[in-house]
Amino acid sequence: MLASIGHDLRTPLTAIRVGIENLRSSDLPPDEREAQMGIILAEVARLDRLFQNLLEMARLDAGAVAAERRRTHPSEIIEAARAQAGPTLRGHRVDVDVDSEVPVLVDPRLTAAALAHVLENAAQHAPVGSRIHVTARIDADTLELGVRDQGPGVPPADLPRIFERFYRGTGADRRPSGTGMGLWIARGLLAAQGGHIWADNPAGGGARFTMRVPVDGAASPDDTDPSSPETDEPT
């Protein structure tokens, strides 16, 4: 745990220090100055995400995560997740396929946060420039979200343990980042609302993660609930 977190702290801190030292140069061209500032801001965001993960992990351990369901469109959950995972998703094409826009009763914050962790995992393991495919499907009592990447897939030896806390899998020493917290947190956030997640390697390559969340019944398109407005967006 300490080695994993220490690596993810040391790397952005080093980049921030180097960037600040470069900015101190009086003869740095404006375009390079902007580039260095962009690097610093990106690494600060990376540190913030790491600390958020640690806080979320502590809340899960303490049993302090409670679901607050409200009527939400599946596309709103996906967009919120993409915004949270935005820095990691840069360099990847995200395709979204939503089977139905009927609003459902779920906790949009927990669901979007779980999906964001899965999207980050896909971006970290798939080649830059590759496609990440996100799907949403609703049946009578379940919202199913899927994420499929074009990476090498999950090694069969890792599949039984991939959602364990701090488990980074075989070959972790060759990857530039990853604490092994994201997928464990995603599983915990879904479990807090009675959902679950699993991974497999579908035919055609890549890894696929599937999340299922109980929806307490789907609403009809013209259903309105004054206490749970359909226009609410996940936060």
Image (tube, rainbow, N blue to C red):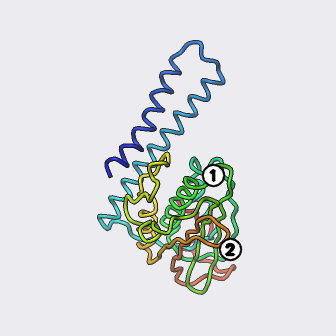
Percent from the top left, x then y, of residue 51? 39, 48
Residue 76's quadrant in the figure? bottom right
Q: Residue furthest bottom?
A: 140
Percent from the top left, x then y, of residue 217? 56, 84
Label 2 sits on a secondary structure element that is loop
User: Is 80 situated above or below 30?
Assistant: below
User: Is 36 situated above or below 183?
Assistant: above
So how many labels did they put on this image? 2
Residue drawn at (47%, 54%), measured in percent from left and top? 171
User: Is 93 situated above or below 220?
Assistant: above
Can you tell which mark lies on residue 81? none
Dot 1 amino acid type: Pro
Dot 2 amino acid type: Glu
Q: Which residue is mark 2?
A: 101
Dot 2: within a 10 Å radius of its alpha carbon, few (fewer than 14), some, or many (20 or more) residues? some
User: Is 202 situated above or below 18?
Assistant: below
Q: Which residue is mark 1?
A: 127
